[in-house]
Image (cartoon, helix red, strand yellow):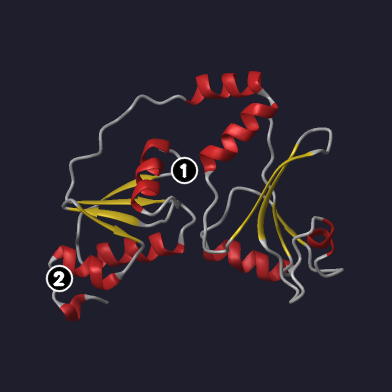
Amino acid sequence: MQTQVLGLSVDSVPCLKAWAESLGGITYPLLSDFYPHGKVAEMYGVLRPEGYSERAIFVIDKQGIIRYVDVHDINEQPDNDLLFRVLAEIDPEAAARFSAQTSVPTTPEPAADVIMYCTPWCPGCRLAREFLSKHNIPFVEIDINRDREAAAKVRAWANGNETTPTFNIKGQIIVNFDREKVAKALGLPPWEMW
């Protein structure tokens, strides 16, 4: 599909660069709405009086018409499947071609004691990888950006959000990287929590 994802923030360029690096890099351009401060966010009606913007998603078609708006709490993650449906409504033929090219056969969950549902950019996932590796715990990662069936499982476990990391530890689901809960589920003594 002919789409372009852009991130826009009222933060400065050095701040955006540091944020992207802290996530291990991101795959889309970030734009700074720093000066004049928040002018673009203000034009789209999402600049708060305190000087920062709401978390918002706008889908704009090729003619410059806003076709979809989602303003939500900073702690909520957008529903990617909903965004794909919006894009498919805008260009059904391209969506059909894209779907045919990217369809993946259904695969069962891997047989492992520890499965971590994650995304490449998630800071909590990076911490969880380090924690599990430090304690020599074998685990399997499933990228929910690439496996939409896995993303649906995470949404079911996390009250509709695509919260990462989410763990399946011997059948026990733990949403987010709560060291105490993860250590307990793994049978680690309390002093090994860190």
Residue 29 in percent (x, y) is at 68, 51
Q: Quadrant of residue 59?
A: top right
Q: Residue at x 59, y 39 (%)?
A: 83
Q: Residue at x 68, y 25 (%)?
A: 91
Dot 2 or dot 1: first in sequence order is 1
In depth, the one of 169 and 31 nearer the eye is 169
Q: Residue at x 77, y 74 (%)?
A: 49
Q: Residue furthest right?
A: 36
Q: Quadrant of the C terminus?
A: bottom left
**Is 74 situated above or below 89?**
below
Q: Quadrant of residue 191?
A: bottom left
User: CA separation, marks 2 and 1?
Assistant: 30 Å
137 left or right of 125 in image: left
Q: Quadrant of residue 30?
A: bottom right
Amino acid under disc 1: Asn
Amino acid under disc 2: Leu
In depth, the one of 133 and 149 nearer the eye is 149
Residue 128 in percent (x, y) is at 33, 63
Q: From the image, tell me which residue sits under label 2.
A: 188
Q: Is residue 1 visible?
A: no
Q: Residue furthest bottom?
A: 191
Label 2 secondary element: loop
In depth, the one of 102 and 50 nearer the eye is 50
Q: From the image, tell me which residue sits under label 1.
A: 145
60 left or right of 35 in image: left
Residue 70 in percent (x, y) is at 65, 50
**Is 178 situated above or below 57?**
below
Q: Residue at x 17, y 69 (%)?
A: 184
